[in-house]
Image (cartoon, grey):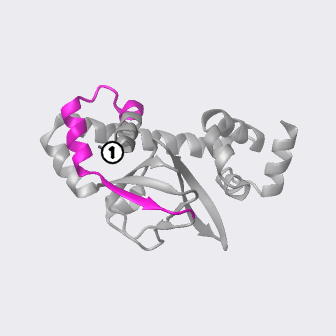
Amino acid sequence: MDILLKDTMDAVVKSRFPKMNYEDRLRIEELLVRKTYKKGDILLKEGDISSNIVFVGKGMLRQFYYKNKRDVTEHFSYEGCILICIESLFKEEPSHLIVEAIEDTICYYLPYDLFMSLSKKSWGVNLFYRKIIEYSLITSQIKADSWRFETAQKRYEILLEEHPEVIKRAALSQIASYLLMTPETLSRVRAAL
């Protein structure tokens, strides 16, 4: 038995749809494909088409893109998180995002086409899917609002409070790009705290 799979499903279900019944959970688990990556491995290249929802079992991933020859971190995912390249997945078009393992990582891939077929057969699975998408949209809106309305220091404080794992485990340059600031500004913000 894959204990990490059980722990990952526990975390993902608890965070998105704690009322999911055991049978629906088992149906989803049967679809999951375990993949292992080394630090620095690229899971999805720019131009690839995303066809999976990814549950992170162990390690940390980041989604990023290039703008003006600099990489900009869009999202971090670690144990119990879900990673989705939404635009590529939904439109079945090449991704602008790159997904990189920033630690040795074990993921569980949920093939989107099989998940959609299952969601048509099970109302509980359909609700789980909806909760995943709702959470992703809300998270994106909160992040966009933070970029627009919060100071650099406040953005760092929010990240520190809500995702201390990112502060502990990601490179400072990646954290700075995620918070839309230079590494020098991040250093000043950290020093002020």
Q: Amino acid at mark 1?
A: Asp
Q: Position of residue 184 (x, y in %)?
A: 83, 55
Is residue 105 shown above or below 96? above
- Residue that numbered label 1 is attached to: 2
Q: Position of residue 95 (x, y in %)?
A: 43, 67
Residue drawn where x is 12% and y is 42% of the image:
121
User: Alpha-carbon neighbours of circle 1 within 10 Å: few (<14), some, or many (≥20)?
Assistant: few
Q: Nearer the viewer, residue 90 or 99?
A: 99
Q: Quadrant of the C terminus?
A: top right
- Where on the picture, by quarter, is residue 133? top left
Q: Nearer the viewer, residue 67 or 109?
A: 109
Q: Is residue 168 left or right of residue 123?
A: right
Residue drawn where x is 33% and y is 45% of the image:
2
- Where on the picture, by quarter, is residue 4? top left
Q: Is residue 79 left or right of residue 155?
A: left
Is residue 83 shown above or below 17? below
The mark total stands at 1
Q: Is residue 67 left or right of residue 34?
A: right
Examine the structure image and report whether residue 24 is included in the region drawn in magenta.
yes
Is residue 150 shown above or below 68? above
Residue drawn where x is 81% and y is 43% of the image:
190
Q: Quadrant of the N terminus?
A: top left
- Farthest residue, direction left: 121
Please provide the residue range marked out in magenta.
13-39
Residue 133 visible to an observer of this rendering: no
Residue 106 visible to an observer of this rendering: yes
Examine the structure image and report whether residue 48 is included in the region drawn in magenta.
no
Residue drawn where x is 41% and y is 53% of the image:
107
